[in-house]
Image: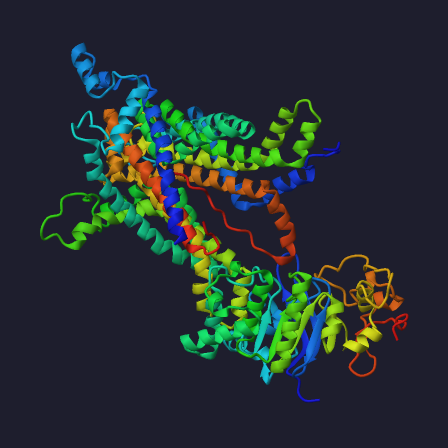
Amino acid sequence: MSSWVYLSRRLIQLPLVLFVASLTIFSLLHITPGDPVQIMLGMETSPDAVAALRAQFHLDQPLPMQYLIWVGDAIRGDLGNSIRLSQPVLHIIEQRFPISLGLAAAAMGLTLVVAIPAGIFSALRRNTFVDYLITGLSIGGIAIPNFVLALVLIYVFSVTLGWFPITGIGSRARVGDTLWQIYSPFILPSVALAAAEIGLLTRFMRSSMIDVLSRDYIRTARAKGLPGWWIIVVHGMKNAMIPVVTISAIQFGYLIGIQITIEFIFAIPGMGSALLEAVVNRDFPVVQGLTLMTAVFFVLANIVADTLYVLLDPRIRY
Amino acid sequence: MSEPLLRVKGLRTEIPGGPGSVVAVDDLSFDIHQGEILGIVGESGSGKSMTALSIMGLVAPAGRVTAKRMEFDGWDLTGLDEAAMRRLRGREMAMIFQDPMTSLNPVLSIGFQLIEQLRWRLGLSRRQARRQAVELLGRVGISGAERRLDDYPHQFSGGMRQRVSIAMAISCEPKLLIADEATTALDVTIQAQITDLIMRLCEESGMSVMWISHDLGVVAGLCDRVNVMYAGRLAESADAMSLYAHSRHGYTRGLMKSVPRIDRRRQRLEAIAGRPPSLIDLPKTCPFEPRCAYSTPECGAKPAPRRNFGENHIAYCWADLPAEEGVE
Amino acid sequence: MSAVTFAPPERSNSALSLASGQFLGNRAALVSFVCFVLITVACLAAPLIAPYDPVAISLSDKLQAPGMAHWLGTDYFGRDVLSRVLYGGRVSLMVALLVVVASTLVGVPIGLLAGFAGGRVDNALMRIMDAFLTFPPLLLAVAIVGVLGPSIENVMLALALVRVPVFARIVRSSTLSIREETYVKAARVLGSGWVRILVTHVLRNAIAPIVVQITIVFAGAIVSEASISFLGLGAQPPSPSWGRDLNEARRFLEDAPWLLFGPSIAILVSVLSVNFIGDGLRDALDPRAWQTLRRATARGSAAQGATPGRSQ
């Protein structure tokens, strides 16, 4: 399959992208006046203790050397140790990443389920009241910051109506928990997270569908006397979905990166709240590791998006 | 003569929107008989394609089609709803479009696009439809049809794609085939091949053809009758010989002078001056009058009369045109 | 190349008036523009029109519901919410403005340099820009703020930094396309000062996407600043801030839900209005849009709905 060749070519480029990304994040974090160890230990610590800690975290080495040590370890799967939590950064990622991924998957699933039918419907009922309503809701969803929406949702559905719990994601499931108890904490965070993505994808699906429906081959399909639903589903959607699928893969990669406020509000122990804790504690190895991990995920999602495009469109062959 | 296959009377097609409705086709009447090849000629924007789409019921939802009468093979097209129209389309009347680069779906294999029609419209089984598709591709001159069935449109040349379009159009053996500038987008040598192919297929099956073109020269050689359209209206209608021998409308005359002819050497080609009018709020008088070399004082004042010139030759024109120099 | 007299395509006056006419004809954009001006003026005039001192604590007035004395109620420390929203807007809008200015001023020269120099310089610069784009902007901004320390100035710096690549890319691609065009070749043959001519052409060509991008970055900066302040890494108490105040409101959702109202509406209205202004500008500045509009008059194509860009 030629698309697999394409995918493998893109994956070969991955190390280069990651090299530049890691260099960027490293430089950003080290071109700074503050000395993490000094900040961490406080001002009254003995110089010896500071020096010992510096050596432990290779902070006594010149910057390029520090970078090489970090990257060398990272390649071997060691992202260093947390200064505060005295555990490997990789451990933190192992614990936190699945939770963030689960939330992102829930939000993405919601996005696809809502946005694709809404976009198609909007396109088919173009310039009617329903179309304007969907468009208005989409724009609202895109414009409202996710943490503002989250607060409104909590106020309406948890505080006032008491339908959904606010917290509970990531807490250890106990024997005898109902499915509702396990999954209901995901509802409000994923809605808050998905709103903007639903808005974007709906708009995208709508314009893609309108574009496709105006094409000559749709007229040909009508001239062949094919049923209307067949034309929309087989001839319309197959074309209209190509850019939409691509966009949603990118959105999925993006979701992990914008979860931070949502994880904060709903007390979700994911990557975002881990980053926030690390930032507050000035725990640089953790900040570095988490940011790099998110970038890897983001880049992978983009590669998947490109590959899907190649896979779906027979005109593109590499 | 027997009942025509298609009878159109007072066809009017309007595309609303913007500052005013565009009247793409206005009060058009014509017949097509069984096995007849009718040419429709005019510049772009003269309403040729809109006429075709109106008959096929493909103008909605963008525009509105009305007609005093529009009958096809015993069906009253003016009274049919979309579901009934759909059953006629592709089965009883089929259409080939101008640009083979855009008229085929790029993400579906040509086999799929042929087979879906055979299965939906003729109710063939998967295997029957596939065999039929291979046979159809063979008939339109695509070699190795079995292999090419799973190829996508972009893997074919323009001429080959148009052959695929033709295969789709004839797949249900329609009674009427509308070819809308079917060869315009192709190279000259390919044009001749495709034209020959369509003519051969229609001779074999006895179907009627509506051949739409902007090229009077080609049409005159192919068709039994020719309708010349201008600004959405019929200008002149005659059998090909009669039209060629003595055209009766200023616009037809202008078109003829702009076509190079082999039988005359060192002939000066004359382009028609000016441009076609806007189709919004067109006056009732002859729309060609401003550009016409033969215009008379009546032309700008009163609507052009329908005048008969012998059997089956009509023109909407005030002027008495001289017999064309040296053609008799 | 022969000596050709070649006039670069100028934006004619009629085109300009058409653009402004179209912007004014776009009702959503016009309403948004008025909204945005009102918000800006109200925030700038906060010292004159705010009914109370935004940081004056009055524990006897704490958590009062909206009423005649306090239109939007009071917070846990008895501070007037309306006054805090007005003063908070000064910070939000100032941050957004400075982010736009800084990222444009850095991004545009980088794009010009990359486009003109080509080769290795281009490659190196754009790889760095691409590296920035491999991080979700909010996350990267949080990391940078984390390093520099929580403060509103550092938020500004971080947000400007993560938006630089967007402008660099626009200008670079404009530079590349302009470089190939005939009139630039002609300008080069004419000799003196071709760099200046080139820069002028490039910027003229890129001005429409830059202006539209500015509105997107502006709206994005408002949201990002609010998000980061909400997380406690931006504006520090007691100074008023839309994001920071929402963090406080979060703790009193049961007792004082009205605390949500002021800052939320302020953020939403500013983001929406800037987005619609951007939409209007895009339609007005896109030369192809005029042509299609002219051509569409007969075909009656309806105007596409507004599509604001992603703001978080």
Quick check: B170 left or right of A188? right
Is any atom of residue C59 visible in this view? no
Most extreme residue toward the front, as rendered?
Answer: B144
Quick check: A238 left or right of B74? left
Tell me if residue B53 comes above or below residue C294 in the rendering: below
- Which of the colour schemes (rainbow, by chain, secondary structure, one colour) is used? rainbow
Looking at the picture, how far across and down is residue A50, in whole percent? 19, 14
Tell me if residue B113 comes above or below residue A56 in the rendering: below
Is any atom of residue C257 visible in this view? yes
Quick check: B230 left or right of A46? right
Q: How many marks on residues?
A: 0
Tell me if residue C306 comes above or below residue C191 in the rendering: below
Looking at the picture, how far across and down is residue A277, in whole percent? 23, 30
The quadrant of the picture occupied by the N terminus of chain A is: bottom left
Most extreme residue toward the bottom, as rendered?
Answer: B2
Looking at the picture, how far across and down is residue C111, in whole percent? 51, 30
Name the residue located 57 percent from the left edge and 64 percent from the top edge.
B160
Looking at the picture, how far across and down is residue B310, in whole percent? 83, 82
Q: Where on the picture, by quarter, is residue C67? A: top left
Tell me if residue B270 comes above or below residue C284 in the rendering: below
Along the viewing direction, whichever of B90 and B170 lies nearer the viewer? B170
Quick check: B297 left or right of A47? right
Q: Where on the picture, by quarter, is residue A92? A: top left
